[in-house]
Image (cartoon, coloured by chain):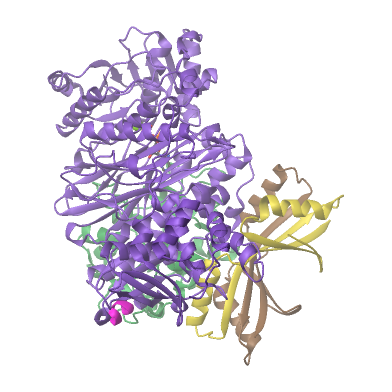
Chain colours: A purple, B green, C brown, D yellow
């Protein structure tokens, strides 16, 4: 075989490509010989953590993945649920952390591009995206650069594509200083019957590569390493940054959907991580077939590319389709109509082998399904991290608490101005939020609401994770991530249908890190089971380490809920003077991990708020029944900053104040800023108050009527009294202020 | 009365215009950028989005689409042509309207609903009295309209300035009300005879009262009414 | 094959938002010596040899690569200046 | 006062979507002689005379005017090439 490696060199190269010696031995065993260079690259990528989930696979089995509405669970490019009236929604979240840390604009942009390809691969038209972001604190110029760049990149890609960005979340914490998180979620819509699979089948069918040319993008790291030792001449160091081309992707969306609609394809897959190797071997593995691919047929962007480079390139905006020879001309005509390249690069075989050739010469030949299915699965060691006892034993009650109304008012404005609480408008103003005309609730409320055009229905979507809680208690933190997403969706009137997740952790080979991962998966699973909400897709991102220590465990949840009647949707904005303000749920003194502690005392410690899942569920059900009965005029959950921040946000959004009396017997700080879970600030018309309270009684959920909407101040009896304009002045300009006065990104200087 | 909405490679608001027209009961269909025939259409819309990615300059490539020669002929015969956002940029690139778009002041993409004042103009696409303040979303990176001083005076004198960014009460801030920095707060202009109209805001996004408002309706219905002689 | 470099800049009097922003940013980074920054486009063409080469490159600029309403351009072949528009 | 010209281009191997799009557009406009188009930035600086002028200009490029992860730049003073990064 061409590209042969000597038995002496191969194990060394294998280690340099990230394979463990035992993994290399397994490859030799599968092949019955030393792998060729191309084979070794292909295995090393497919058996990498990113593609094989070798450290997480077992833990992920805890997730509930089935349910009445699930049309496609984990295992395909995206999960799919039925949302009624024959419509289905596909969604998934994915990380692009490491590329974004090198080049934030392109890293984030190509992250959006990748997740959107996962959606239309399923036959769904991308209809919305969300993003979950984590950075270090913005007093550091590098963090500002990353933040500005990532936001610009997300907007730059999504806006050009014409997919609205409707929500997300962002936190700033020193824990992410050396390792930002950029998680992108995309959602698509389709008729149920159009659900497709990334599968190759039918001996003699043709493999068609559609879209962009193939360059050496994304293989800089590994290939430079290898080329120094094994190539004739040391290649110049190439940056492994991929540049996104959203225009090409827009054409791909239109062409692929037209191809699928016309029934012209046998299967369709996207090229993501590990490029052609991954999509081709997964499609072959699903179909139980073999593939024969000739790299000389692949349109190259650069000269003298090697077979392995073609096979592992991560050039963006490419799709792989399987077509019958009879439909080839029609399929290629559709691509041409959309101005896209399409090239037959190989065919489906009945041998079950993945053969790669360069012209006449075979450079790789292996059992196709061993790439995707035979990757090792590990049972990593785990130990409860030592830091937990220390942080959890901290008692927030040992710190002094403000009691004077003037001090409390100052604390409220400080918390409102905290980068983790303040208005996110600076971010989403850079995103097209409305294209496609489905966004009924724009970003800025708890969940975005998107209508299912042509029906009365809508979906509500939110992505959430408080990493600080997960750091203090990974099990509870992950439960809260789920509960908060469900709560945000419920506040809009959506009944949770399914979630996707993106699990961001440090190095899983460290037992303490793996323990936090395992606990988080367990917490999220338990919450999902209690709510009867399945996990239909997701992504794991390990090795997120910041200067040698892991980031906060950050298991982000992306939740989609359904509103049967879109006109019943609710936002957080207070509406009319005289409306009655109700607090659903009961406040306890739970200051551990709170924004108050962090902002006022600079402390991140204590036990996070408890999550009593049955109570949480009862409250969501009560809220949803009330919304569906048309009794609720606004609803907003209490998250970071507690009830005081929730009230302030409702008032700012509605441009109208409130007079409130909190009837707990806690001290003022706990009453205002405790982050007890399962609480919702809602309003109803005065004449509906009785019906609403009756409904809550019948649900046996704790609630209290706390006040009335009106005026231009937020007055909380005995505690504080602040003008609306003072609240807005604290909450609105923080992000813009933090990034202003600073050097703008060089990206911004690029035309276009 | 039938609207034709041109689909350029990369357009992404063409479906929105079609949905908006249908919502308003207007007969509408797509026109492919490669077509060379506008027979059967009574008005043409160049929609928003990013034609050809707008990588070189917004609208620079789309202007050369085969259909554009026909759009120019259609307009010369007095046919109503509306360019929304990228469509406006294409009209400028094609010299069907004067001026050009620079990057937004601040170099950020801006998506937000803004107040706009309807100016007294000769524009045939406007269906509300001048002085009306409308709230319509803008959504662009390059909407910072610029034009040389002589042409600006000509636009003013000829009633060709159709829409201006303004404060919520309809006044213009001394330092300018345009979030993108546009010259003289200009958000939309028309040609001398008023049949070609380009605007940066997206009226098709505010047509359905169930979704975000109705302030954009009149831009679509006025032409229909005028043609029907209402 | 011939190589051309094209420099596209805003016409005099046209405001240059990226240039103005860069100037401010450089100033705030401590480069107070900056008096002005202009940002334009730098285009490199490779064209097969043929008749009227330079005329055709100018045409490409007039039609597509620059916007004559707001931009000027300068074309340079290899090292020597040949044409401006 | 000194004047510097800076040419910023993508590093070798980095895909240049604007260039690729321009090449396709020119081809479809009939300029089939086009073999490749690359689009970068052309920056003109005016700086007050001072010590370390060129060092400081290079710094400006590294920090702000170019993105060293994906871009190369070349600085030219008046007419002569002085520095590259
Ligand atoms: N990165 C982002 N991109 C888009 N929208 C965002 C982003 N971050 C926050 N938002 C939006 O800002 C609003 C407030 O966000 P957040 O404070 O996280 O809400 P909550 O506390 O209800 O989860 C939401 O509408 C959210 O979707
Ligand atoms: Mg919320």
Across and down, in percent, residue C17 comes to 61, 54
**Is B63 displayed left or right of A178 in the figure?**
left
In front here: B166 or A732? A732
In front here: D8 or B62? D8
Residue A560 in magenta? no
Q: Residue furthest right?
A: D51
Vertical relation: B109 (above or below) B32:
above
Vertical relation: D48 (above or below) A604:
below
Ligand 2's quadrant: top left
Vertical relation: A150 (above or below) A732:
below
Across and down, in percent, residue A206 comes to 31, 77
Tell me which residue sits at (87%, 49%) in the image: D51
Whether residue A563 is visible, yes or no, is yes
Across and down, in percent, residue A736 comes to 54, 38
Tell me which residue sits at (17%, 51%) in the image: A455
Q: Residue furthest bottom?
A: C51
Magenta range? A328-333
**Is B60 displayed left or right of A340 in the figure?**
right
Dominant SS type (magenta): helix
In front here: B187 or A600? A600
Vertical relation: B154 (above or below) A146:
below
**Is B207 displayed left or right of D84 in the figure?**
left
Tell me which residue sits at (50%, 10%) in the image: A399
In front here: A318 or A8? A8
């Amino acid at each position: 075989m061409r590209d042969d490696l000597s038995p002496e060199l191969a194990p060394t190269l294998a280690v340099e490509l990230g394979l463990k010696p035992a993994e290399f031995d397994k490859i030799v065993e599968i092949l019955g010989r030393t792998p060729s260079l191309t084979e070794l690259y292909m295995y090393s990528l497919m058996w990498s953590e990113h593609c094989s989930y070798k450290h997480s696979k077992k833990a992920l089995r805890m997730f509930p993945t089935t349910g009445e509405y699930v049309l496609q669970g984990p295992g395909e490019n995206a999960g799919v649920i039925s949302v009624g009236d024959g419509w289905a929604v596909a969604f998934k979240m994915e990380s692009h952390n490491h590329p974004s840390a090198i080049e934030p604009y392109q890293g984030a942009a190509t992250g959006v591009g990748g997740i959107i390809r996962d959606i239309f691969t399923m036959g769904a038209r991308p209809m919305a995206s969300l993003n979950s972001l984590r950075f270090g604190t913005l007093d550091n110029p590098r963090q500002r650069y990353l933040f500005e760049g990532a936001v610009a990149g997300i907007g730059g890609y999504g806006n050009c594509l014409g997919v609205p960005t409707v929500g997300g979340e962002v936190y700033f914490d020193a824990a992410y200083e050396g390792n930002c998180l950029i998680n992108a979620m995309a959602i698509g819509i389709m008729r149920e019957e159009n659900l497709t699979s990334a599968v190759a089948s039918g001996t003699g069918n043709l493999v068609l590569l559609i879209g962009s040319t193939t360059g050496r993008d994304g293989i800089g790291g590994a290939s430079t390493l290898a080329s120094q030792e094994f190539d004739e001449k040391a290649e110049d160091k190439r940056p492994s940054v991929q540049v996104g081309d959203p225009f090409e992707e827009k054409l791909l969306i239109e062409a692929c959907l037209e191809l699928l609609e016309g029934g012209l394809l046998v299967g369709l897959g996207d090229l993501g991580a590990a490029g052609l190797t991954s999509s081709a071997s997964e499609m072959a593995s699903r179909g139980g077939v073999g593939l024969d691919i000739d790299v000389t047929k692949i349109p190259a962007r650069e000269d003298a590319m090697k077979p392995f480079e073609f096979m592992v390139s991560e050039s963006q905006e490419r799709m792989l389709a399987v077509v019958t020879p009879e439909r080839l001309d029609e399929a290629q005509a559709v691509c041409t109509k959309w101005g896209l390249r399409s090239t037959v690069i190989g065919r489906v075989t009945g041998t079950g082998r993945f053969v790669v050739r360069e012209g006449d010469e075979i450079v790789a030949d292996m059992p196709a399904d061993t790439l995707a299915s035979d990757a090792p699965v590990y049972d990593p060691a785990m130990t409860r991290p030592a830091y937990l006892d220390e942080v959890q034993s901290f008692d927030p009650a040992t710190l002094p608490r403000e009691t004077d109304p003037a001090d409390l008012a100052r604390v409220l404005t400080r918390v409102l101005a905290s980068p983790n609480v303040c208005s996110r408008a600076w971010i989403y103003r850079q995103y097209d939020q409305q294209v496609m005309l489905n966004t009924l609730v724009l970003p800025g409320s708890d969940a975005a609401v998107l209508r299912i055009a042509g029906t009365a229905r809508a979906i509500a979507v939110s992505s959430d994770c408080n990493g600080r809680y997960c750091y203090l208690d990974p099990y509870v933190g992950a439960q809260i991530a789920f509960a908060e997403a469900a709560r945000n969706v419920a506040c809009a009137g959506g009944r949770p249908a399914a979630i996707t997740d993106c699990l961001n952790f440090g190095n899983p080979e460290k037992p303490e890190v793996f323990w936090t991962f395992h606990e988080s998966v367990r917490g999220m699973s338990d919450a999902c089971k209690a709510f009867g909400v399945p996990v239909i897709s997701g992504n794991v991102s390990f090795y997120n380490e910041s200067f040698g220590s892991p980031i906060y465990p950050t298991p982000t949840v992306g939740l989609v809920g359904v509103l049967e009647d879109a006109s019943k949707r609710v936002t957080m904005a207070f509406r009319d003077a005289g409306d009655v303000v109700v607090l659903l749920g009961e406040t306890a003194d739970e200051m551990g991990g709170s924004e108050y502690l962090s902002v006022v005392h600079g402390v991140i410690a204590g036990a996070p708020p408890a999550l009593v899942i049955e109570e949480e569920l009862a409250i969501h059900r009560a809220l949803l029944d009330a919304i569906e009965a048309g009794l609720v005029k606004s609803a907003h959950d209490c998250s970071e900053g507690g009830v005081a921040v929730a009230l302030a946000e409702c008032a700012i959004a509605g441009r109208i104040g409130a007079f409130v009396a909190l009837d707990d017997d806690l001290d003022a700080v706990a009453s205002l800023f405790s982050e007890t879970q399962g609480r919702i600030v809602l309003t109803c018309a005065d004449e509906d108050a009785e019906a609403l309270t009756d409904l809550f009684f019948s649900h046996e959920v704790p609630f209290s009527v706390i006040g009335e909407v009106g005026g231009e101040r937020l007055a909380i009896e005995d505690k504080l009294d602040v003008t609306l304009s003072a609240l807005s002045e604290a909450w609105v300009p923080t992000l813009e202020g933090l990034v202003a006065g600073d050097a703008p990104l060089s990206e911004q200087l690029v035309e276009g | 009365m039938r609207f034709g909405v041109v689909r350029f490679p990369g357009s992404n608001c063409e479906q929105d215009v079609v949905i908006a027209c249908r919502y308003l009961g207007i007969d509408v269909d797509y026109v492919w950028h490669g077509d060379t025939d506008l027979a059967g259409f009574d008005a043409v819309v160049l929609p928003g989005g990013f034609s050809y990615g707008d990588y070189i300059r917004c609208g620079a490539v789309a202007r050369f689409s085969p259909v554009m020669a026909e759009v120019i002929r259609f307009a010369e015969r007095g046919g109503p042509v509306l360019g929304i956002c990228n469509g406006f940029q294409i009209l400028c690139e094609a010299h069907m309207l004067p001026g050009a778009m620079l990057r937004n002041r601040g170099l950020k993409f801006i998506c937000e609903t803004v107040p706009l004042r309807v100016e007294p103009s000769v524009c045939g696409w406007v269906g509300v009295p001048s002085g009306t303040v409308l709230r319509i979303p803008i959504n662009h990176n390059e909407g910072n309209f610029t034009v040389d001083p002589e042409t600006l005076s000509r636009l003013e004198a000829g009633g060709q300035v159709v829409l201006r960014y303004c404060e919520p009460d309809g006044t213009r801030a001394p330092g300018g009300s345009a979030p993108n920095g546009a010259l003289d707060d200009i958000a939309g202009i028309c040609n001398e005879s008023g049949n070609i109209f380009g605007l940066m805001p997206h009226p098709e996004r505010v047509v359905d009262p169930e979704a975000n408002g109705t302030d954009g309706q009149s831009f679509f219905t006025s032409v229909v009414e005028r043609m029907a002689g209402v | 094959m011939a190589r051309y470099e094209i420099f596209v800049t805003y016409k005099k009097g046209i405001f240059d938002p990226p240039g103005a922003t860069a100037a401010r940013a450089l100033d705030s980074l401590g480069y107070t010596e900056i008096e002005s920054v202009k940002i334009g486009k730098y285009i490199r063409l490779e064209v097969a040899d043929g008749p009227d080469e330079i005329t055709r490159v100018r045409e490409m600029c007039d039609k597509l690569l620059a916007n004559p309403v707001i931009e000027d351009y300068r074309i340079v072949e290899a090292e020597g200046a040949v044409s401006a528009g």
